[in-house]
Image: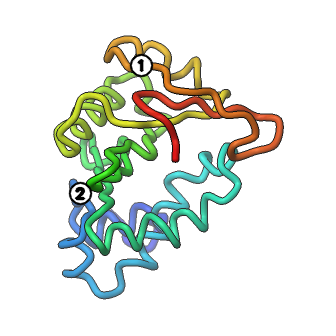
Amino acid sequence: MNKNALSKRDEFLYNFGQPSIIDRSFLLQHSLMPKKIDDFLMETLGGVRLYYPDFKSWINYTVIPGVFTGERSIILEYRQNDLAGLAILKDSPDEKKLCCLQVMPKYQGTGIGLTLFERSFCFLDTKKPLLSISEEQKNNFYKLFNYYGFEFGEEYNDYYRPLKNEFSFNGLLK
């Protein structure tokens, strides 16, 4: 593997030995990690920005500080040394939430989503984590939510974007 030809995402994974989880202990072992995680997440989850306009500030001011405090973690799933997907989780005393789940395009339809859901359930110690999706993603997740018996929570108008709806499952957004 030619390190010079790697993307920021691949360079991050290459340099840190393809971690299966990015959590507080991982951050404490690597002093330059917050900026690298920011770059990694922005490159990996770039398409999610279409649905969440404040995505970058959420990464910088919520996710990364939450990983430092131990309230948030990032699960990574690989296939043949290639990042296949990831999930960002929130595990606090008052909320167990699957905040973001992304399967890389070439791995969609291969079961990576199911694997990430199962790993998230184990990590959060619940089979019914709170989560929400944009209206555009509803059809993509319908079969999974039905399979797991997720319960519809609420439809939120203009929650993240004007004239767009957000749907919560297994609880209500705060």
How many numbered markers are drawn? 2
Question: Disc 1 to disc 2, how far (Cα)?
Answer: 28 Å
Q: Are marks 1 and 2 in contact (CB under 8 Å)?
A: no
The N terminus: image quadrant: bottom left
Amino acid, disc 1 = Glu
> In the rendering, at what x and y percent does residue 123 appear?
19, 45
Residue at 70% x, 54% y: name it. Answer: 53
> In the rendering, at what x and y percent does residue 173 appear?
52, 42
Task: State left or right for residue 158 relative to residue 7.
Answer: right
Along the line of sight, the residue nearer the viewer: 51 or 97: 97
Task: State left or right for residue 96 relative to residue 136.
Answer: left
Quarter-wise, where is residue 66 in the image? bottom left
Q: Is residue 18 above or below residue 152?
A: below
Residue at 52% x, 47% y: name it. Answer: 174
Q: Is residue 28 above or below residue 75?
A: below
> In the rendering, at what x and y percent does residue 68 appear?
31, 74
Where is mark 1, residue-wise? 151
Amino acid, disc 2 = Ile
Classify mark 1: residues with Cα within 10 Å, few (<14), some (14-19) or many (20+). some
Q: Is residue 1 above or below residue 87?
A: below
N-terminal of the pair, mark 1 or mark 2, is 2
Outermost right residue: 163
Residue 139's tag is: none
Where is mark 2, residue-wise? 21
Classify mark 2: residues with Cα within 10 Å, few (<14), some (14-19) or many (20+). some
Of helix, strand and loop, which one carries label 1? loop
Visual colour scheme: rainbow
Residue at 25% x, 82% y: name it. Answer: 30
Residue at 40% x, 61% y: name it. Answer: 10
Of helix, strand and loop, which one carries label 2? strand
> In the rendering, at what x and y percent does residue 121 appear?
23, 36
Q: Is residue 74 above or below residue 148?
A: below
